[in-house]
Image (cartoon, coloured by chain):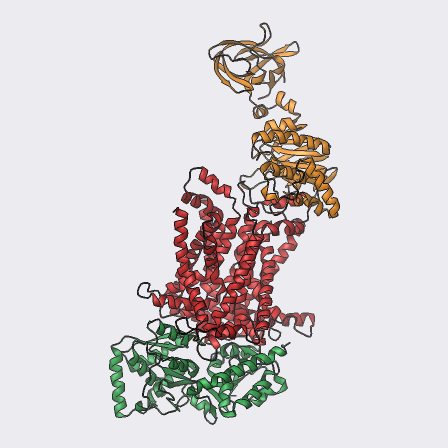
Amino acid sequence: MLEVEQLVKRYGKGGAGVRGVSFRVAPGEFFTLLGPSGCGKTTTLRCIAGLETPDGGRIAIDGAPVFGAGRTVPVNRRDIAMVFQSYAIWPHMSVAQNIAFPLEAQNLPRAERARRVDQALAMVGLEGLGGRPASLLSGGQQQRVALARAAVRGAKLLLLDEPLSNLDASLRERMRAELRDLQQRLGTTAIYVTHDQEEAMSLSDRVALMRDGEVLELATPQDLYLRPTHAFTAGFLGLAELLPCTVRGPEGTFLRVDTSLGPLLASGDPAGTLLLIRPEHVRLDAPPGAPNQLHGTIARAAFAGRHVDYTVEVAGHPIPVQAASGRMHPVGTAVTLTLPPAQCWLMKG
Amino acid sequence: MTLDRAVALALGLLLCWMVAAPLGLVLLSAVRPGGFPLDPGFTTANFAAVYLAPGFPELLGTTLAFAAGSTAVALVLGTLLAWAIERTDLPGAALFRALVILPMATPPVLLAIGWTMLASPRIGVLNRVLQDTLGLSAAPFDVFSLGGMVFVEGLSLVPTTVLMLAPACRNMDPSFEEAALASGASRLRVLRRIVLPLLLPAIAAAACFMMIVSLVVFDVPGTLGLPVRRFVLSTQVFHWISESPGGVPEYGKVGALAVLFLAILLALGALYRRATRRAAAFRTVGGKAFRARPMPLGTLRWPVFTCVSAYFVVAVVLPLSVLVWSSLMPYQVAPSRAALALLTLENHRDFLANGQVAEAAWNSVVIALVAATAVAALAGLVAWLVVRRRVPGGAVLDALAFAPIAVPGVMIGVALIYLYLATGPILPVYGTIWIIVIAYATQYLPFGTRLIGGSMIQLHPELEEAGRTSGASEARILRRVTLPLVAPALAATWVWVLAHALRELSSALLLRSFDNMTVPTLLWDYWSGGEPTRAAAVGVWLVLAVLGALLLSRLVGRRAVDA
Amino acid sequence: MPEEIAVPTRRTMLLAAPALLLGRSARAQVDALATEAAGLGPVIWYESTPSDLANQVAAAFGRRYPRIALRHVRDSGGNAMSARIIQESQGGARTADVATNSASVFWPLAQRGLLEGADWAALGATPSMAPTPYSLLATASVFVLLSNTKLVPEAEAPAGWDALLEPRWRGRIGVWQRTEPFVSLAALWGPERVADYLGRLSAQLPFLFPSTFPLAQQVAAGEVAAGVGIYHAALPAISRGAPLRYLVPEPAPISSLYSFMPKAGRNRPGGKLFSLWLATEEGALAYEAATGRGNPLIAATRTAQLLAGHTSVEQKPEDADATLPLIERYDAILRQTGQAAPSK
């Protein structure tokens, strides 16, 4: 559906450039470009849209080249729809006029336009608000109008540039679900740009993690989170404890490694030198006798509602642990940590 | 009483003194049998003489056609130009941005003469070149016609239009255009359906302004319309003031006509407010940060470049070339190869050797700097109080600051003379450069308030509210948030007033005395003494001075941004 | 071709005898004026010549009266001077001590009671030099027929009023938008004949110019081939080599400029002294040397020589009120006829 090959975009002063980005997106896929600000994810998206002209590489949408080999298809001739971070709802138009604009640009007859605008309004739950001036909408409503405007065109490729970042937390979570639902119903391919790893993982079929203008890692959310190949990925996607280690050799289905906490069983890259431990994978309540058990003392405990954040001192080394919030261990309690070997992930440094 | 109200009150009093008092004197003269405000008696004869004159409907018709036509030309060219140089990746946009103001420095009378040399059916060099190369039997252009007047006046209004629209263009969130492009709209549709409507407040403000300016402008109709009897109201005003057979200016009639101009102004003001009623809809400068990304013109890039270049050739290069040409001629000669033999630097030598130049230049610079700064400050304050602070009585402030535009500059000068003759013992400004400063500040205030007000409407209140919630005082918010955001409009106002004050003639002549000579009065001395080519030499130096001032202000501006 | 322009030399100026033949008592009056004026500060002179030229006149006056400084303030033309004097008089400010302008300007001022009268006859002035107590003749503008020497061969140059009505001049001539020369002509021809003439001239679709200076320049540039101009307004172009010729028509309309003294002046003796000096041969020649305009009643001036052999015609200044409707009528003829048939 979308092919991006060796995309290069240089920037003069301090802007986010893109240095040879390549990926392919399958039809119907929800694909996310994730990364910290300045990593080049928005630039990549704008190159796909045609709002920026790359300095090199090739882009094809639905098999048709839109950039490369000396030709550039202008934005308005690309079969895309885009949702902007600021929504870009035109303040001088009503809600319906905003949504109808892409249809107007296609010169569709008035009646057909009205029918599809009503459909789109219903789809985003704004029935009956078509006549309202766009400038009187709340943030969430603007977001829905922006989505409806993008959806109404029936484009094969939907581009979303941090569409949820201007919403408050609860609305953001609800819109996230609606967005995914909408994309599924429309069956479009979506390219989504965000710096929020949770958003990326919960929405996407696949995620490309970008850093300094390059795609560092491209995988499904699970692989990226549980089985990353880079320390940066591990750290960017969530809380991570990274322990330097040395692999001693296989032991059963796992690998035996030496760490500053002592010998442990782990899985992953046999040539790995770093051990990733996610705080939520560490168990405090496992029965004795399980592998990878360490003894320590609770040094800090913070109640966070859904879970409790502990810092456990093990051999003078603080290990973050996230445990279910049913029971609180007071500071000073001696505990036994269990690190499931399947979730102790070895990777290169 | 809050600080706002105190400031508004003080400003209101100042504006009453600066604007209402002179305007009152102008209107008073309308009911005086002798036409002078301090003359005794009362009459309505002036109104009858103006409005019931047999030719009046036709005169009004020609005037409106001229004003509407010039405004249309200026708006179409100015909007496209402002958009192209501010919002797109037009090649050479920075250069165009700097050059667009240049024609403003040329005194309009010289510009009109330049166009005679270019497009007169008899001696116009464009006509001759086209006739020779295309073998035409008749001259293709006739600048001595209503169309010619509209064209030249329209062109001369373009720089102002660009200045008024450029800040609005610059401040517009580029996602608005990008979203439209990404919706599949062509660039033309984006311009028509998105850009133009979003610029509507700024365009409406510019339209009001241009309309009134072209109602009262004299130079172009006087040079191009008068010879072929295309009379407009301003040529009539000129006749009343300068050429009335009685030997005394008929200020009474001018005052009576000013009532009509004020009425038109109020009507346009109401239209403007209607056009921008949903002011909130046009807060295109949101709280969200955006990078000013130029819109890619794509395949239109070079065609647009060609059009913009063509405009610059026609509006800047051609007239300025004729100006330079004239300044190198001993007497007025249309450009031709044969005339090359006459080339002389005498006019320039003469200008530079003129003992009055140093004094006149110093006066001009002081007047221009003070007037420009005063207008930017006053207009900024008025716009801030009216648009941002919404003080009670704001509409009155706004109307006061806009009203001077409806009165010919000469009439303002006349009224100021009375005002400062009467206050001579307390405010001894009559006969000094300061009365000229006051006249210019009054005359140019309307431009400043339109431009800065239009720019402030665009600001989302959140930007100031954020400052307030940060615990900043109002003064600090004004200084650190509002001012930097409207800085482009303030700077544009300053430059515009500077350029106009450097070239302004009519009120300077009226207020002239021994020691307040300015460069344009020097120019006028040559011009009216039958030496237009020497006047052209002064014009060339004026344009150079304004160019220098522009470059300097850009340099200073850039440093200020960097700091 | 016209005769060479005779610019008076310094020598002729020094040799010139005073035009006002002052008797013993008059001379004593003048001396008294000079003494009085010297103690009253500079003499302010409102006049329309560019200041650098007018300052030459001031310098010549200063050579005659070294203790009196003359300061020239340039009037911006048209009716600006009367407006200024009225305003300054009404506002109680200092105004000109002496001003030079046409009857149409000083007459309304005199009627408003703003001018000081004088017994000019006692000072030796003839009635034609001092037609009213408020005015002393200073100089005159002479209307001439201009043509472009390149576009119009000498033999075809319009030399008389009727020549301008020939069909070949249709759309090719320029006139001043003020009908002053024709109003002057009416003093000899009578109002009706001039109205008829003007109607036929308007049918020629002449270009109207706001002032006679650009008119002369546009004849020189070839924008119009010929026109009714003013002699001294054509001089700057001619002196710089422009292809411009002038012929004095018969009868020759002139427009006299007079010196007059506002009551609100602070150095009125100085103003009076300067008025008198301008009316002497020395003053008239100095003024003509600077401005090209001379006093037609002083034989040594170029202007008097120009008009020699011609009937110079003009309305009387004291008839200004009666002339007013005539001007309005002629203005209307000149402006309206053309509107009916716009030029192509």
**Residue C140 percent coordinates (x, y):** 43, 85
B73 or B19: nearer the viewer: B19
Q: Residue furthest bottom?
A: C309
B201 horizontally vs B444: left or right: right
Tint of chain A:
orange
B222 horizontally vs B385: left or right: right
C98 or A42: nearer the viewer: C98
Q: Residue furthest top?
A: A289
Residue drawn at point x = 67 percent, y = 28 percent: A206
Check the image and report above or below for A126 versus B357.
above
**Residue A118 percent coordinates (x, y):** 71, 40
Q: Quadrant of residue A42?
A: top right
Check the image and report above or below for C159 versus C101.
below
A249 horizontally vs A155: left or right: left
Image chain in green? C
Q: Quadrant of residue B36?
A: bottom left
Residue B96 in view here: no
Check the image and report above or below for B474 versus C61.
above
**Residue A138 percent coordinates (x, y):** 58, 38
Tint of chain B:
red
**Residue A306 percent coordinates (x, y):** 56, 19
Residue A298 in view here: yes
Residue drawn at point x = 63 percent, y = 78 percent: C341
